Amino acid sequence: MRRSLLILTGALLACAAITGTSYVLARQICAHELAGRVNGLVWLRREFRLSDAEMQRIRQLHEGYLPRCRENCARIAAKKKELQAVLDHAQGMMTTEAQQKLAEVGALRGQCQANMLGYFYEVSRAMPPEQGRRYLAEMQRITFGFHEQIENTMSIDTSSPHGHH
């Protein structure tokens, strides 16, 4: 009986590791594709059947946005390092300084999302109206979807399996 339990536990842990690794890799690939070089816009042309003129305008928008995106990512990464240093020094306690750094990371992420939305709006306006609406809806789903899944799972909604936390 004990051996069966160990085998079952090992199998479940292996499945969880495979699932987690697959999820992380899929998110990285999606992020890479979305933030890729101008040639990475090939999917956009194909998916939304855009003309040469529309693609030229979108390429200009993309080239203008990438430096801001990289800057946002660098600022977030630097602030996360500061947060990690504070957490390492706090020895397992949530300090006021750690809370402040966490809030700063959150604020930077919020600014980043606002910048992305601005960029997505610009790109959507460079497309035919119906295609632009579809593009904007997809970009919003990707941008906010991950956090919304967590928030929905952890909300106090009684229909949620975690709602009684």
Image (spheres, rainbow, N blue to C red):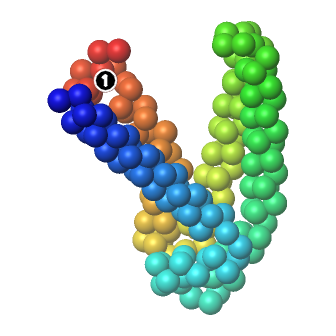
Residue 71 versus residue 51: which sits nearer the camera? 71
Residue 55 versus residue 159: which sits nearer the camera? 159
Q: Mark 1: give few (<14), some (14-19) or many (20+) Cα within 10 Å.
A: few
Name the spot of residue 54 as percent of width and height, x first.
61, 82
In this picture, is 165 found above or below 54?
above
Query: Dividing the picture into quarters, in which one does residue 149 lie?
Result: top left
Name the spot of residue 33 as percent of width and height, x first.
59, 68
Name the spot of residue 67 as percent of width and height, x first.
81, 60
In this picture, is 103 found above or below 125?
above
What residue is pinned by disc 1? 162
Q: Is residue 157 left or right of residue 82?
A: left
In this picture, is 19 found above or below 138?
above
Q: Secondary structure at mark 1?
A: loop
**Amino acid type assigned to the residue bearing label 1 in the image:** His
Name the spot of residue 92 as percent of width and height, x first.
66, 13
Q: Residue at x 74, y 55 (%)?
A: 69
> Which quarter of the rendering shows the C terminus?
top left
Q: Residue at x 43, y 35 (%)?
A: 150
